[in-house]
Image (cartoon, rainbow, N blue to C red):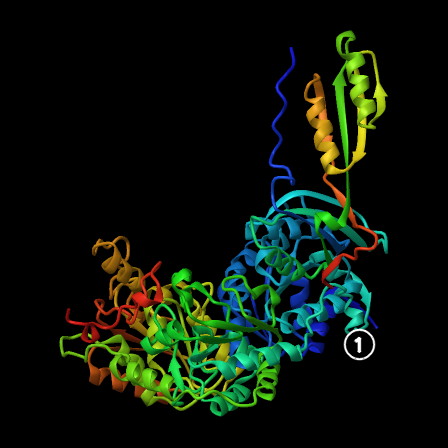
Amino acid sequence: MELTGAQALIKSLEMCGVETIFGLPGGAILPVYDPLIDSPIRHILVRHEQGAGHMAEGYALATGKPGVAMVTSGPGATNIVTPIANAHMDSTPLVVITGQVPTSSIGSDAFQECDITGITMGITKHNFLLQSAQDIPRVVAAAFHIATTGRPGPVLVDIPKDVAQSTMTWWWPETIEELDLPGYQPTVSVNTQDAKDAADLIAAASRPVLYVGGGTLKSQATAELLAFAERTNIPVVTTLMARGAFPDSHVQHLGMPGMHGMYTAVMAMQRSDLLISLGARFDDRVTGRLDGFAPEAKIIHVDIDAAEFNKIRRADVTLQSNVRDAIEALDAALVTPPDLASWWTTLRDWQERYPLAYDEPENKGLLRPQAVVEAIYERSAPGTIVAAGVGQHQMWAAQHWKYESAGTWINSGGAGTMGFGVPAGIGAKVGRPDATVWVIDGDGCFQMTAQELVTARSEGIPIKVAILNNAYLGMVRQWQEMFYEERYSEVYLSPDLPDYVKWAEAMGCVGLRATTPEEMRAAIDTANTINDVPVVIDFRTDSSEKVFPMVPSGASNDGIVVHHSQRDPS
Amino acid sequence: MTPEPIETAASPANITHHILSVLVENKAGVLARIAGLFARRGFNIYSLAVAPAEIHERFSRITIVVDADSAPLEQIVGQLNKLVNVVDITDLSPTDAIERELLLATITTNVDVQTNLMEVIARANAAIVDVDAHAVTVALAATPQACDDFERTLAGFSQVELHRTGRVALPRLGRPANPLAE
């Protein structure tokens, strides 16, 4: 069967099980958009290529399947660089197709030419520049294989226009060998002796903590984690990337660790004598100042990526494996779990003294942002998916919502990409149309990518967006208040400019505003009954609210600052 | 007048160096991928040599002398091994490896130095590979240490140009190299 390169590309995507592509056409990718008309693949036409990338990420995080985005060359390709970098930091499986100028023009500074494989070399797991149409099936299959196996990540495929226009004889690689990747062997199996050594450390520990990272969700190990935690009675902390990997309602869950983590989660790691790291990478937001981090803890480090071992913190035992297999091996090797009664006494005491706290809403005309998050949680269906931008609202959404299952928390962790929330929420809703999706956003973030609500409305993707509108770039404001003597530099945004309700309405969405607790509850209930169009609620929140607890940047976790009501009067 | 010996950049004799013999797929951009990785992770390269590999034309062998003070060797190897085009990495510790490097130098000749220069060339077992009325080009293929010594000696003469290749290496017979990653 003779096909054009463009037809082969679309057919290859179909063969890889792609159901949805997020994209925006342009000159160099034009040939590929033609056969797309005849394909069962759903294409979602975004308003900016960054939106396509974040939607693909949201789709991947909500479904566990790779997200796919397609854009044109030059500025189309550079506009999707931020989502690629974001996916690379958070190990999100993504396949990004970019158009490229014809092979004969490459290197000539042609119209809309840019070296996108060069630009994304350091922020993709791998990338390809297609040389011939005959190679398209192999390269597309390889891209999906690389993106989804081992430590997942983004893969970019750059297709020159002439390659899309030339013809090839259709074939499909049936085996891994045909992908021709001699340097890529993602399959690893747990070393039994290492598992025994790790089990010995667990049996001998008196203050162990299960330090659960995003790799636990990536390897779909939540059931194994729950069983192992319950068998051993070891306390659990879930990082920002792992919210939902262990039920927040579970008695053994201490919450999120890190810069804005729960006091007990942070201190449990600090005082621990054994950290069992499951697909986590000792990120600086978790460790605080490294030389003061968990000084007495031995480390069992489980990761599929061997390059994470001893990168930040030297491990006593390393297990190169996906988290699920590693937990099963630990469970098999562990004969008698340790007695943790005294450890739990300490932990329960901390939990009692230092719960998550904020000032109760005063009736002074503005909402407490934490109360908004809690109200949405209480008034929405179980299993609701939350997508967030980056900043204070993201931390409140991570702290004050109860995540019970995988794929219910969608956020930008490693890269900290403002504007992630709206497009990621759209992608999540496309991937799981039966779930309610709430985007908890900040006013600063919303202004970066709000145009994608036009996409959501026109494509029939009814997400709900809660803007915690405090009229500031709130997290930066918090740092300026606490560490720059309240010298506020370039952080004020205004609560009224833009008018978020009118903006929402102009984009075909329902726009609501809430200033009082009564209006807040009414607006949330209204939003939850609207299931045909997107809803945006402008929640007017108190700009003086800060995220606590907080480990100041550069400080050891021992220097954690709790809410003022919990501070020692001395 | 004898010029002062030239102080060379920190030679591998002065740093904790390792030789990584890296088998890569011979694909466009593979050297950029490796160089980019070293640059963005802050790993230092002392020297680097690339050539088609012995086993198949689709592979190349890159011999990289790395500064293991700039980052732990385990980290360098771990990150390098994640590159999809990297097929195999062998760590050749200097004591377990045969290392060779090629040095080419053009020296101005005149009556005053000629005898002395010929002695130096002969003592180093270097070869004269080109000559004209005013200059001579010499070649030395030897251990990096011998190349260092020869370079220092040549500094006493009037040099026109001096190039070194960076080293290539193979494991010493009877001392199998440490296969770090496949």
The residue that appears at 68% across and 26% down in the rendered structure is B152
Q: Which quarter of the figure has residue A183?
A: bottom right
Residue in the foreground of this view, choosing between A148 and A276: A276
Q: Is residue A214 visible?
A: yes
Q: Position of residue A104 (x, y in %)?
A: 73, 48
Q: Is residue A59 visible?
A: no
SS class, disc 1 = loop
Q: Position of residue A260 (x, y in %)?
A: 34, 70
Residue in the foreground of this view, choosing between B38 and A310: A310
Quadrant containing the N terminus of chain B is top right
The subunit carrying tag 1 is A
* Residue furthest top in the image: B111
Q: Is residue A139 above or below residue A200?
A: above
Q: How many marks?
A: 1
Q: Is residue A167 left or right of residue A79?
A: right
Q: Is residue A301 above or below residue A489?
A: below
Residue occupied by mark 1: A174
Q: Is residue A452 left or right of residue B101?
A: left
Q: Position of residue B124 (x, y in %)?
A: 80, 27
Q: Is residue B92 left or right of residue A292?
A: right
The residue that appears at 72% across and 59% down in the rendered structure is B85
Quadrant containing the C terminus of chain B is bottom right
Residue in the foreground of this view, choosing between A327 and A317: A317
Q: Residues within 10 Å of mark 1 (few under 14, many from 20)?
A: few
Q: Is residue A282 above or below residue B96?
A: below
Q: Position of residue B161 (x, y in %)?
A: 71, 24
The residue that appears at 33% across and 61% down in the rendered structure is A555
Q: In the rendered structure, which amino acid carries the disc numbered 1?
A: Glu
